[in-house]
Image (cartoon, rainbow, N blue to C red):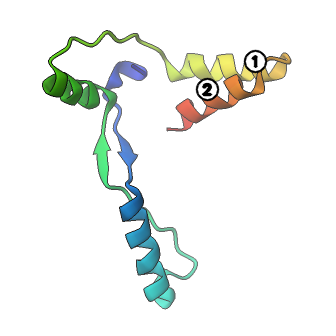
Amino acid sequence: MYNGGDVKFSATTLAHVAHAVVGVLENPTETANRLIYVHSAATSQNQLIEYATQIDGRGWTTSAASTVDVLGESRWTLGNGGNEMDAMNGFCVVAM
């Protein structure tokens, strides 16, 4: 769990992305030079674990991590010739 697991993040289905793209294409004047934000749901890691537990009845084991630590590790890995993919994965975790 990153940063306690209660930080909300957006998730989007492909269908909702398609619907948004169609909306932009059908409204070019209203959407020209504008940022468009799309999401299907906003949830947290703890909510996802709760849902999974309700569905399968299992107890889930989690571990805690700080995105500040992940960022530092990724920078160190990238700057010291480590595996670039590992570093990029860490940057992606922090960006979410």
- Splitting the image into 4 quarters, where does residue 89 fall? top right
Q: Position of residue 59 (x, y in %)?
A: 21, 11
In the figure, residue 9 lies in which quadrant? top left
Where is residue 29? Give x, y as percent.
50, 90
Q: Tell me if mark 2 has few (under 14), some (14-19) or many (20+) residues whose alpha carbon lies within 10 angstroms of its own.
A: many
Would residue 24 appear left or right of 51 to someone viewing this image?
right
Q: Are marks 2 and 1 in contact (CB under 8 Å)?
A: yes
**Disc 1 residue crowd, few under 14, some 14–19, many 20+, Cα 10 Å:** some
- Residue at 35% x, 19% y: name it: 4
Q: Quadrant of residue 33?
A: bottom right
- Dot placed on the residue nearer the N-terminal end, 2 or 1: 1
- The relative height of residue 95 versus residue 3 in the rendered view (above or below) is below
Q: Nearer the viewer, residue 28 or 51?
A: 51
Separation (CA) of disc 2 from disc 1: 10 Å
Residue underneath mark 2: 90
Residue type (three-letter) at the residue carrying disc 1: Thr
